[in-house]
Amino acid sequence: MKIDKNVPLPPRIANRVTIGPLPLKDLKVGDSIFIDADDDEIDRMLHSLRVRLARFAAKHADYKFSSAKVKNGVRVWRV
């Protein structure tokens, strides 16, 4: 195998979605929040959101969430 030197990295593709702060601690059981998203970013938004909810729930055992695609965005429920 040959070692190449001084080969530049390709530009990074921005594939991330910014959600911003979420009031997860303020949600009571049965409450929900809506997050507006364009049609082309809903799937990435939902994935990013579910990772964030899982991390939050891992630190707060009494919090459980459900999320789904809805018209014009994503909705999160505390269950």
Image (cartoon, rainbow, N blue to C red):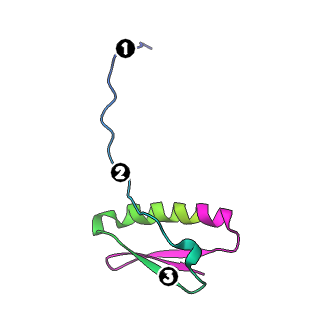
Tag 2: amino acid:
Asn
52 left or right of 45?
Answer: right
- Mark 1 closeness class: few <14, some 14–19, many ≥20 residues within 10 Å: few
User: Which image quarter: residue 75?
Assistant: bottom left
- Residue at image position (53%, 62%) is 52
Nearer the observer, disc 1 or disc 3? 3
**Residue placed under numbered mark 1 in the picture:** 5
Up/down of 39 relative to 71, above or below: above
Up/down of 70 relative to 14, above or below: below
- Residue at image position (30%, 36%) is 11
Tag 3: amino acid:
Ser
**Residue placed under numbered mark 2 in the picture:** 15
Q: How far, Cα to Cα, is label 3 from label 2?
A: 26 Å
37 left or right of 53?
Answer: left
Q: Residue 31: image x %, image y %?
A: 53, 85
- Residue at image position (53%, 60%) is 51
Q: How far, Cα to Cα, is label 1 from label 3?
A: 53 Å
Tag 1: amino acid:
Lys
Up/down of 3 relative to 72, above or below: above
Q: Which residues are magenta?
A: 55-79
Q: Are marks 2 and 1 in contact (CB under 8 Å)?
A: no
* Numbered label attached to residue 29: none
Q: How far, Cα to Cα, is label 2 from label 1?
A: 28 Å
